Image (cartoon, rainbow, N blue to C red):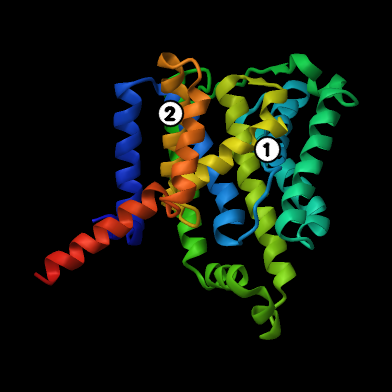
Amino acid sequence: MFGKVEKNPILTLTCMALAFLIYGYATSLPKITDFMIFCIFVISFDLLYGHMGQLSFGHMLYLGAGAYGCGMFAYHIYPDPFLSILAGVLVGATVAALLGTLVVKTSHAAFALSNLALNEVGAYLVLSPWHKWTGGEDGLSLFFKKYGFINFGQSTFRFYFCLASLLLVVYLMLLLVRSPYGSLLKAIKENEVRVRFLGYNTFLYKYITFIISGAIAAFAGALMSINLSYTNTSLISPTRNVEVIFAALMGGAGSVIGAVVGGTAFMTISNYLAIYVVRWEMFLGFALLIFVFWFREGIWGYLSKSGGALEKERSNP
């Protein structure tokens, strides 16, 4: 069953839409809107980690670039929501393109730590030297123009807009990872030296992937700014990088659907467990240990594997 869902994009998007609609109306639309935006961020991170094989400790930099690009455009230039989102994505993609020329040349620990260092620099610039434009510690309070029924001030409209955005990102990512380009990324992850020996410019493919990942993260950041009607330093904080890493591991690295499952699971635990448990972070830590040592394929990987084994058993009684 789970294998069929993963192989059929239309079925994937339909099931995902129904799941978020049910979850949203059963709980809280604004809260589930946050969940969906976070899932987009996890997808962007997993493109680097799960598909290209590079762990980044500074992915919040690109989320923050998108959030501040969107917020500063709306606050200082013109409060059009769509132009603000576009500005955020362009800022995030530009930052990724500029920094990628240096970062992509590294790998493994150097890649992870260089991204973290750049994230620290970005957070400092937002907080101090650029505080006149970013609002510093106070951030920026935002409002956006209305166009008839297009009203980002309404939580219901934001929910459906973010749901449509998530489905679009998932669909495009499924096309990407299942294309020859995605196959080449997988080959680079497994053995970059061999791919380079075959004549491929691995730096170029990794560089383009880095920019795509940064742009998607920036898109998530722009949506966060619009959903919160606010932009502050928490959206670029280096200490929050662990959240997206945890979510990717929880859902199953290297899977677009796994990224959505992991993002939703992480946000559900962190939002609802905190209501009943004071030290809820400790339980998240235990959960991470369980996934690292016993369920390395993540929730979605485990479900897909179990479902495939069950189908095989039924077909061969």
For this view, does 126 lie left or right of residue 20? right
Using the rendered view, name the quadrant where residue 268 is placed.
top left
- Residue type at the position of mark 1: Met
Which of the two residues, 282 or 131, is positioned nearer the viewer here?
A: 282
- Which residue ends up furthest to the left in the rendered image? 317
| Nearer the camera: disc 2 or disc 1 | 2
* Separation (CA) of disc 2 from disc 1: 20 Å
In the picture, which quadrant includes the N terminus?
bottom left
Name the side, left or right, on which 282 lies relative to 99.
Answer: left
Relative vertical location of residue 296 with respect to residue 27 in this rendering, above or below: below
Q: Amino acid at mark 2?
A: Ile
**Secondary structure under badge 1?**
helix
The residue at which mark 1 appears reads as 60
Task: Kindly identify the residue that appears in the image at 46 percent across and 23 percent down.
Answer: 271
Q: Is residue 95 visible?
A: yes
Q: Is residue 231 above or below residue 293?
A: above
Q: Residues within 10 Å of mark 1 (few under 14, many from 20)?
A: many
Q: Which residue is mark 2?
A: 269
Q: Earlier in the sequence, mark 2 or mark 1?
A: 1
Q: Where does residue 277 sit, x and y in percent of width and height?
A: 44, 17
Which residue is depicted at the point 57% across and 73% down? 187
